[in-house]
C-alpha cells in the first residue's frame, strides 16, 4: 500500500471513456494521433472511490449534534426522539422524487471533492416499501456522475414496531426483503449492522448467508463499538469488505489480514462523534491487510463529503503513511466497492475517472485540510466538476 507510482510531465490518453495509455507526455503523444488535448496543471489522481455511504435520507439531524455536544449518549438521544430511528421515521414519509432530489445534491458535493464512484446503502426504511424505494432512488442515479454501487442494508437497525420481536424482523429481512430486492435486481451487495444491541454475529451470519445464496455480494458493519467477532465473520464469509473496525480484536485483525476482505475504516465518524477510538489501520496494514478509507456519509454520525479529508485523518489519526492513505481512497476503495479491476487506478483498461488536485506534490492531498483542493473531475473521460453544487442547499 505504500507504493505510489508518480509520473512527472505525464499524459493520459482516453478513448471511449477508458484509459488507453498513461506515461510521459512525449510517449503518450506519439500514440495519441489527432486526439483533442486538455492541458492541466496539478496532480491527476484516479477518481476517488467512497466505499461506504448512507447517502439516501431526508432531514439533517441537527438536534442530535447538540445533544451529543452536551454529553448525552445514544440511548438518551434515542429516548428524546433522535438517533437513527428518527431518520427512519422521516425517510418513510419521503417520496422517491424528494429522496432523489436530496441525494443528487449531496452526491454533487462528493463529486466536487473528487469522488467519482460511491457505494450507497439503503437502511433508513426498515420496511419493504421504503427499502425498495431507497434502492430505486440509488438505481435511478447510478449512472452518475458520480457512479453508484447499490447495497441493501435492511438489517441496519431493528425498527420500533419490531422492538419486542427481533426474530420476526430478521425473518422479514431474510424471507421477504432479500427475495424482493434480488427479484428487482437493484442491489449488488447486502450489508448488516453487526453490533451487540443491534444485530448479533449469529443474526448477521443468517442474513448474509441468505443474501449470498441469492447471489448478492456481502459487506458488514463490524466491531465499531465492540470487538464481538464481526471482522472474523466477514473474513470467514468472504465479504468484499468489513467496515468500521474501531474495536476489532487481534483475532479479527489477523482474520482480515489473511483474507481477501478489505478493511474499510471510517475516521470521519469518530471525529464527528467526538470519540477517541482509532481503528487499527497500522496493525491491519503491517499484518498484510488491505485498508480503504471512506466517509460513512450519513446524517447521524458523519455528514461529510470529502475523501481527501479522510486521507488526512488516516495519516493524522490512524498512523497511515500518505501513500497508504491515497491508496485507501483509490485502489482499495475500488476493491471494497467491488470495482478493483475497473476503477481506482490510472492504468490502461480502467475507466477514465480522474480527479485533478491543485497541488504540486501528491502528498499535499492528505496534508491541507478543510479546503477543497479538487479543481476538475472527469467520469468516463467527460469533465463533470459540479461547480454549482456549492450553491445548492443540502436539505
Ligand atoms: Zn455505515
Image (tube, rainbow, N blue to C red):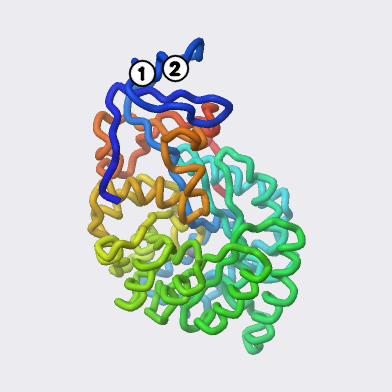
The x, y position of residue 182, in whole percent, is 72, 63
Q: Is residue 263 left or right of residue 142?
A: left
Q: Is residue 387 left or right of residue 246?
A: right
Could you say whether the residue bearing mark 1 is in a helix, strand or loop?
Answer: helix
> Quick check: marks 1 and 2 in contact, CB under 8 Å?
yes
Q: Which sits in the foreground, 123 or 119?
A: 119
Residue visible at 43% across and 54% down? 295
Residue visible at 42% across and 35% down? 347
Question: Does label 2 point to a residue whose CB lies under 8 Å from ligand 1?
Answer: no
Q: Is residue 10 left or right of residue 96?
A: left
**Residue on which the image places disc 2:** 31
Q: Which sits in the foreground, 361 or 90?
A: 361
In this orientation, does residue 65 appear?
no
Alpha carbon separation for disc pair 1 and 2 = 7 Å
**Residue on which the image places disc 1:** 27
Q: Residue furthest bottom?
A: 164
The x, y position of residue 144, in whole percent, is 60, 40
Could you say whether the residue bearing mark 2 is in a helix, strand or loop?
Answer: helix
Does 305 appear above or below 204?
above
Amino acid at each position: 500500500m505504500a507504493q505510489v507510482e508518480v509520473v512527472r510531465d505525464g499524459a493520459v490518453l482516453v478513448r471511449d471513456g477508458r484509459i488507453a495509455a498513461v506515461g510521459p507526455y512525449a510517449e503518450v503523444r506519439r500514440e495519441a494521433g489527432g486526439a483533442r488535448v486538455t492541458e492541466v496543471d496539478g496532480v491527476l489522481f484516479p477518481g476517488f472511490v467512497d466505499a461506504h455511504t448512507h447517502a439516501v435520507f431526508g432531514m439533517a439531524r441537527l438536534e442530535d449534534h447538540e445533544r451529543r455536544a452536551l454529553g448525552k449518549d445514544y440511548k438518551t438521544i434515542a429516548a428524546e426522539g433522535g438517533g437513527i430511528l428518527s431518520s427512519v421515521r422521516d425517510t418513510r414519509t419521503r417520496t422517491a422524487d424528494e429522496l432523489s432530489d436530496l441525494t443528487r445534491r449531496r452526491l454533487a458535493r462528493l463529486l466536487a471533492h473528487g469522488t467519482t464512484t460511491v457505494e450507497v446503502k439503503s437502511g433508513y426504511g426498515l420496511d419493504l416499501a421504503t427499502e425498495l424505494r431507497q434502492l430505486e432512488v440509488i438505481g435511478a442515479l447510478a449512472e452518475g456522475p458520480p457512479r453508484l454501487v447499490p447495497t441493501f442494508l435492511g438489517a441496519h437497525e431493528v425498527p420500533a414496531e419490531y422492538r419486542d420481536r427481533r426474530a420476526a424482523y430478521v425473518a422479514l429481512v431474510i424471507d421477504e426483503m432479500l427475495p424482493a430486492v434480488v427479484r428487482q435486481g437493484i442491489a449488488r451487495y447486502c450489508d448488516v449492522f453487526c453490533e451487540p444491541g443491534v444485530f448479533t454475529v449469529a443474526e448477521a451470519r443468517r442474513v448474509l448467508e441468505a443474501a449470498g445464496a441469492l447471489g448478492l455480494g456481502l459487506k458488514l458493519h463490524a466491531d465499531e463499538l465492540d470487538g464481538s467477532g464481526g471482522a472474523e465473520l466477514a473474513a470467514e464469509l468472504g465479504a468484499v469488505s468489513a467496515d468500521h473496525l474501531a474495536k476489532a480484536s487481534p483475532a479479527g485483525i489477523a482474520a482480515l489480514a489473511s483474507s481477501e476482505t478489505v478493511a474499510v475504516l471510517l475516521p470521519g465518524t469518530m471525529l464527528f462523534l467526538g470519540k477517541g477510538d482509532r481503528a487499527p489501520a497500522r496493525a491491519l496494514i503491517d499484518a498484510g491487510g488491505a485498508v480503504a478509507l471512506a466517509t460513512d456519509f450519513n446524517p447521524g454520525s458523519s455528514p461529510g463529503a470529502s475523501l481527501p479529508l479522510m486521507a488526512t485523518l488516516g495519516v493524522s489519526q490512524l498512523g497511515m503513511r500518505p501513500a497508504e492513505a491515497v491508496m485507501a481512497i483509490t485502489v482499495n476503495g475500488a476493491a471494497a466497492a467491488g470495482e478493483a479491476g475497473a476503477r481506482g487506478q490510472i492504468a490502461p483498461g480502467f475507466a477514465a475517472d480522474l480527479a485533478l488536485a491543485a497541488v504540486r506534490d501528491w502528498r499535499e492531498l492528505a496534508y491541507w485540510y478543510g479546503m477543497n483542493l479538487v479543481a476538475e473531475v472527469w467520469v468516463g473521460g467527460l469533465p463533470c466538476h459540479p461547480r454549482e453544487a456549492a450553491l445548492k442547499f443540502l436539505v
